[in-house]
């Protein structure tokens, strides 16, 4: 039986992974090693009972008593905290889903690679903050990293049997998020609720807001550059409001290979789960007779400064991805908390990157995860100071 662990089991990607496992026979078909979650311990315990997991881990120590209580009588042990997440990643498994949101998802996935485990990577922050380290660790231990972001899964699939040297360009599609049709003047005043009304995809709260600001696409551009090893200028972004084409690869003979399907993350999760085979998935099929038209518009960097900042990050490389992501996470926290406006998020990230360039070590190549963590910490502090300044100005 295949041994599977899911980091971030209670989130949007985690739940959909479990849904596919259930579809393929659940506890009869898979041996579930570790399931991890955050504060939603009731749900985590339910999942652990259903899949008869070896262990359930919450990221938060203060949630441990509640998790233990929820697992009472099941015989499934509970654990909590960062060290417990790493221990869970050390448990022998064949396939691990990395679906914790944010920079916190990096360490457990990184740890699993040393055991040669196949890492299905939904946590895009891992490649953005530590791409070269992650790929080197995988190569050192003969571990596979399979992309789960829908765009990267699409690109991965469009590359099957092809020679990377023949690739001319990679075109990432972007839905444009909830605010794509808003006039620029109104965009700056968008609320959290408005940014959360995604037209096509049902995802976690943070990535949904990142879709509206295009910070999600910015992370994905960097992720593409790192995972596929292409030059920054080979990565293009196009807004495609229907989200039917999940991304494309253009070859030097002018041919374009595109991945099409309904907007359902289980395409990408299922491909990684069954790779290199293709198995039946419970996803809706495209009906071309009712599809109507597929439309495209340019991704305007004035409207979406996150995309311009992603280009800067790729030009600097080094620790710029770690700083970019950390500042973005802090800016997002403050937007969700109501202290800053929608457009302030990009301003905070830009100010943080400017502050850290030159003598700030932004361009230094990380030698270990500690270097990444340190840059993450510094960038968070700087971004938090920027956000506090903005909040004070708004209040005054
Ligand atoms: P989510 O918010 O729905 O779930 C996140 C999971 O991580 C939960 O299980 C939560 O308990 C856990 N978690 C949160 N903070 C944590 C911390 N500090 N330490 C340990 N665990 C923590 O998120 P999601 O939408 O499922 O996204 C997960 C990852 O997948 C993100 O990196 C996201 O960018 C990426 N992704 C998501 C989608 C999608 O459709 N949801 C698509 C592509 C990529
Ligand atoms: Mg995506």
Image (spheres, rainbow, N blue to C red):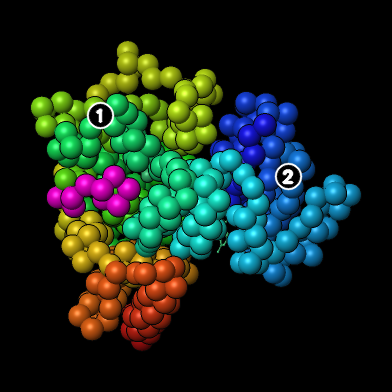
x and y, in percent, of residue 98 in the image = 52, 49
Which mark sits nearer the N-terminus, 1 or 2? 2
**Residue 34 screen position, x and y as percent:** 67, 49
Which label sits on residue 53? 2
Residue at (24, 24) in percent of width and height? 293
Residue 372: assigned label? none
Q: Which mark is residue 162?
A: 1
Q: Residue at x 15, y 26 (%)?
A: 255
Q: Quadrant of the C terminus?
A: bottom left
Task: Tell me the quarter of the picture where residue 170 sits.
Answer: top left
Image quarter in which the N terminus is found: top right
Element type at mark 2: loop
Which residue corresponds to the image point at 25% horizontal and 64% vertical from the top-left?
Answer: 317
Q: Does the magenta-highlighted stretch encompass residue 226?
A: yes
Asked if ligand 2 lies within 8 A of label 1, the reply is: no
Foreground tag (1 vs 2) = 1
Residue placed at 83% from the left, 58% from the top? 69
**Depth check, front residue: 192 or 366:** 366
Magenta stretch, main secondary structure class = helix
The residue at the far right in this view is 73
Residue 207 visible in the displayed image? no
Q: Is residue 234 visible?
A: yes
Residue 296 percent location from the top left of the image: 20, 35
Q: Is residue 149 above or below residue 383?
A: above
- Looking at the image, which residue sits at the far top? 289
| Region in magenta | 225-233
Residue neighbourhood size for the residue with mark 1, other residues' Cα within 10 Å, grouped as few (<14), some (14–19), many (≥20): few
Q: Residue furthest left?
A: 253
């Amino acid at each position: 039986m295949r041994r599977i662990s899911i980091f971030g089991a209670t989130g949007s990607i985690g739940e959909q992974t479990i849904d596919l496992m259930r579809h393929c026979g659940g506890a009869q078909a898979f041996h579930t090693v570790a399931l991890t979650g955050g504060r939603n311990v009731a749900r985590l315990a339910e999942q652990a009972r259903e899949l008869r997991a070896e262990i359930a881990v919450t990221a938060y120590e203060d949630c441990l008593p509640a998790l233990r209580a929820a697992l009472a009588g099941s015989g499934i042990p509970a654990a909590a905290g960062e060290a417990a997440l790493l221990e869970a990643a050390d448990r022998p498994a064949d396939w691990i889903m990395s679906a914790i949101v944010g920079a916190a998802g990096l360490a457990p996935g990184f740890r699993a690679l040393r055991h040669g485990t196949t890492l299905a990577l939904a946590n895009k922050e891992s490649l953005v903050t530590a791409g070269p380290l992650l790929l080197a660790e995988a190569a050192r231990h003969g571990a596979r990293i399979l992309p789960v972001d829908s765009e990267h899964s699409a690109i991965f699939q469009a590359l099957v049997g092809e020679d990377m040297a023949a690739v001319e360009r990679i075109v990432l599609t972007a839905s444009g998020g909830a605010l794509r049709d808003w006039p620029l003047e109104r965009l700056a005043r968008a609320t959290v609720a408005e940014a959360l009304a995604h037209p096509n995809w049902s995802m976690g709260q943070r990535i949904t807001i990142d879709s509206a600001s295009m910070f999600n696409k910015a992370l994905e551009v960097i992720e593409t550059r790192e995972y596929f090893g292409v030059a920054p200028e080979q990565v293009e972004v196009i807004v495609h409001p229907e989200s039917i084409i999940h991304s494309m690869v253009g070859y030097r003979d002018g041919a374009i290979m595109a991945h099409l399907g309904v907007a359902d993350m289980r395409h990408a999760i299922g491909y990684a789960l069954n790779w290199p085979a293709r198995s039946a998935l419970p996803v809706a099929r495209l009906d071309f007779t009712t599809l109507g038209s597929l439309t495209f518009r340019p991704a305007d960097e004035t409207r979406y400064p996150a995309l311009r900042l992603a280009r800067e990050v790729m030009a600097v490389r080094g620790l710029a991805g770690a700083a970019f992501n950390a500042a973005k996470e802090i800016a997002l926290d403050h937007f969700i908390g109501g202290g800053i406006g929608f457009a302030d998020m990009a301003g905070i990230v830009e100010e943080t990157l400017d502050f850290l360039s030159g003598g700030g070590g932004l361009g230094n190549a990380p030698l270990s995860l500690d270097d990444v963590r340190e840059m993450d910490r510094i960038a968070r502090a700087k971004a938090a100071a920027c956000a506090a300044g903005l909040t004070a100005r708004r209040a005054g």
